[in-house]
Structures are given as structure tokens and as C-alpha cells.
Amino acid sequence: MVHAQFDPTARRELAVAAVEAKTVKDLSWREIADAAGLSVAFTTAAVLGQHALPEPAARAVAELLGLDEDAVRLLRTIPTRGSLEGIPTDPTVYRFHEMLQVYGTTLKALVHEEFGDGIISAINFRLDVKKVADPEGGERAVITLDGKYLPAKPF
């Protein structure tokens, strides 16, 4: 049976434990996604508490990370999504906010894994928006965010 969360606390705690296990085992998000049999972005978002995993994927991820049966159950539970706070009122801006609520922690995790500690500049930055045909009908928006990576520097 499919279940949904009401209180996101357990998923947040599981995300902390999963990231700790990932770090201890020196695994990449790609390796975890490969075990799950799903895309790296979706799997990362799921492990970080933003998506539910199908049972086989949840079991594979839990096994790889050394997590228990409770973790499998939580990974399969539809989460209370949103990892950021503050709600914009403009509908277009809200949709970007919604995208970052679901994928913000995933983007952060993937950028840091790929580049290390630092930020993606919004000053030295390129943005491209294209309208393309959707093979299923209608149109799709392709948005490219292209920012210079700026590493954190100890001082």
C-alpha cells in the first residue's frame, strides 16, 4: 500500500543518516542511483527526502547504505516535500520556488560532489530558456543555468 507522510521529521532524520552512510562508505550519488536503477537526480532527491522510491529501489539503496527495514519503509513513503522556507506569491516565481523546494538540496549535493565546497555564481552567470516541442504533445521549457563555480577559500 502507498503511504504519505504528514510530519517530515523522520524523512529528514533518514536523509541525515543516509548522507552519513554515503560519506562513510565513500559512495557517489551516481553509485547510489545505479543501485536504485533510477536517474541520479531522482535518486538523490529521494534519498534527501523529496521523492518516494519504488520498493526494489528502496531496498537496493538501503542495502548499499547499510540501512535497516525502517529506512526501506521510509524511502517508500511519499514525503512531505520542501526543504526550503518562504513562499513567493507570483505564480511564475512560485513554480521556480517549487522546483527548488524539490530539487534544491539535490542540486547542492550534486554540485558539491562534482566541484567541492563552493558556490555557483549568480554574477558570472548565463541563463537560457528555450521552448521545445514535447513529444507527448504541447511544449516544454528548457532552462539552462550556467554559473561560474567559485571555490570556498580558507583564510
Image: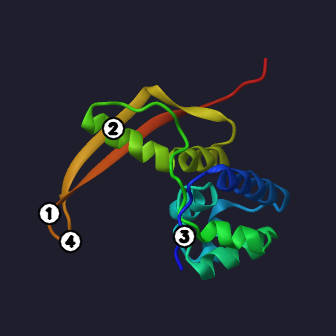
Residue type pointed to by label 3? His
Marks 3/2: CA–CA distance: 27 Å
Marks 4/3: CA–CA distance: 32 Å
**Labelled disc at residue 138:** 1
Q: Is residue 117 left or right of residue 5?
A: right
Mark 4 or mark 1, which is nearer to you?
A: 1
Task: Say which element carries label 4.
Answer: loop
Disc 4: CA contacts within 10 A as few (<14), some (14-19) or many (>=20): few
Nearest the viewer among 132 and 67 is 67
Task: Say which element carries label 1.
Answer: loop
**Labelled disc at residue 94:** 2
Residue at label 3? 3
The numbered mark, 2 or 1, whose residue comes first in the sequence reads: 2
Q: Identify whether 146 is placed above or below 76.
A: above
Task: Say which element carries label 2.
Answer: helix
Q: Is residue 88 left or right of residue 137?
A: right
Disc 3: CA contacts within 10 A as few (<14), some (14-19) or many (>=20): few
Give me the residue at 51% from left, 46% from top: 82
The numbered mark, 4 or 2, whose residue comes first in the sequence reads: 2
Residue at label 4? 135
Residue type pointed to by label 1? Gly
Nearest the viewer among 155 and 140 is 140
Q: Is residue 4 left or right of residue 34?
A: left
Q: Identify whether 110 is placed above or below 136.
A: above
Residue 90 position, x and y percent, is 27, 31
Q: Looking at the image, do the residues carrying marks 4 and 3 touch, with CB atoms under 8 Å apart?
A: no
Residue type pointed to by label 4? Pro
Furthest toward the top, the residue is 155
